[in-house]
Image: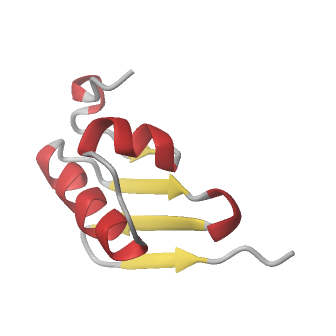
Amino acid sequence: GDDYSGYQGAFIVTPNLSELEAIVGKCENLGIVVERAKGLRVSLDINNLVVTLGSSGMLLVNENEVIHIETDA
């Protein structure tokens, strides 16, 4: 669902891009995904947010860094 309040204070949450967009709105590019993932992480006090991006890899967002891990087919 789109209610992530149950994840308040979680160590790690791993939504896919569609799940993230259901919460924060449409993300037209990776820069917007990063900014909205940062905002969600801070607002819910989540230590690590990993957004899976399908063929575009995954994105790790935490307090110290943002890492985009690309796929390698």
Left or right side of 55 for 14: left
Residue sitting at x 18%, y 42%:
44
- Residue 51 vs 29, above or below: the answer is above
Q: Which quarter of the rendered picture does the C terminus lie within? A: bottom right
Left or right side of 33 for 72: right
On the image, the x and y values in percent for residue 63 come to 24, 69
Residue sitting at x 25%, y 59%:
36
Residue sitting nearer the eye, 17 or 49: 17
Residue sitting at x 30%, y 54%:
47
Residue 14 in view here: no
- Residue 6 vs 21, above or below: the answer is above
- Residue 32 vs 8, above or below: the answer is below
Residue sitting nearer the eye, 18 or 51: 18
On the image, the x and y values in percent for residue 16 come to 53, 46
Left or right side of 41 for 61: right
Q: Quadrant of residue 72?
A: bottom right
Residue sitting nearer the eye, 41 or 27: 27
